[in-house]
Amino acid sequence: MIIIKSDREIEFMRKSGHIVATVLHELESLLCPGVTTRELDQCAEKQLSRLGAESPFKGYRPTRSHVPFPGVTCMSVNSEIVHGVPSDRQLAEGDILTIDCGAVYKGWMTDSAWTFPIGEVSDDTHDLLDATRTALYASIESARSGNRTGDIAETMQRAVEDRGYNVIRHHTSHGIGRNLHEDPQILNHGRAKSGPILKPGMTIALEPMVLAGHYDTQVMNDQWTVSARDGHLTAHFEHTIAITDDDADILTRINCNGGI
Ligand code: MG
Ligand code: MG
């Protein structure tokens, strides 16, 4: 069931989204060779608490047989595409790190991810990041009242494939609000003019997950980390947005120098 949020509810989500953006911005300033993903995750936990929020990820358990997710953020390095578990792994010059962060503020959730270069990275790596970011903003442009979820899916897939990359098949964009994952589920690939119609007040997290190689992925032994099966680089950008009568309203963006 798709839930339409009131203006007041969207304002709570905007506050939640501002917290997520603030935490990501803070973590970006700490990125350097040698820092561990666990240290970054611990910083995120402190920042969320300072800002009056909690993580919707920590302890998350999609099924009873799953190990609860141990981190506040997902930290995915290089060929790890989503759901990376924070660890004592030290980042190295030339790595890329996806930080996926959520917040629960007064019961309202938002979700955002960004892939960051660590120090100097290759031109090919910059191109992958640029293509993924471009696919996110193209899909946000297609997220307009009256369009359908398939319009977003086709836009995202085309934006990625036009740049010579592949988009993930087994993970999707999603509705969000009181719960981290709500209807509608939005595939990152598909056909225009299919799926539910977008209406003002719908809140969704759009998240192209992009692979430089084949789109096959595998879940690692920790039960969480999803990696490219062929070991090639991956990138992931995500914003939580609200559908309006006009352009989509990006709830997880902060407007400042270097802001995402
Ligand atoms: Mg996310
Ligand atoms: Mg998400």
Image (spheres, rainbow, N blue to C red):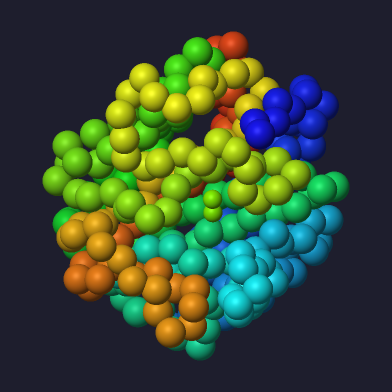
Q: Is 37 displayed left or right of 42 in the figure?
A: left
Ligand 1: quadrant of the figure: bottom right
Which image quarter holds the N terminus?
A: top right
Q: Is residue 83 above or below residue 91?
A: above
**Quarter of the image where one finds residue 78:** bottom left
Closer-to-camera residue (46/138): 138
| Residue projecting furthest to the bottom | 88
Q: Residue at x 36, y 34 (%)?
A: 153
With respect to residue 18, does 145 lie above or below? above
**Up-down relation of residue 210 to residue 188 (above or below):** below
Q: Residue at x 63, y 43 (%)?
A: 182
Looking at the image, residue 32 sits to the left or right of residue 122; the answer is: right
Q: Is residue 158 above or below residue 112?
A: above
Residue drawn where x is 70% and y is 31% of the image: 3
Residue found at x 33% / y 71%: 218
Residue 5, given in percent of the width and then of the height, sits at 74, 27
Front-lying residue, 56 or 172 = 172
Nearer-the-camera pick, 155 or 91: 155
To which quarter of the image does residue 34 belong?
bottom left
Residue 98 visible? The answer is yes
Horizontal arrangement in the rendering, residue 4 relative to residue 206 (left or right): right
Q: How many marks?
A: 0
* Residue located farthest toward the left when viewing the structure as drawn: 164
Estimate the x, y position of residue 204 in percent, counting from the top left: 57, 36
- Indicate the quadrant where residue 23 lies: bottom right
The percent coordinates of residue 87 (x first, y second) are 52, 83
Residue 90, position as x, y percentages in the image: 43, 84
Residue 121 in view in this figure: no
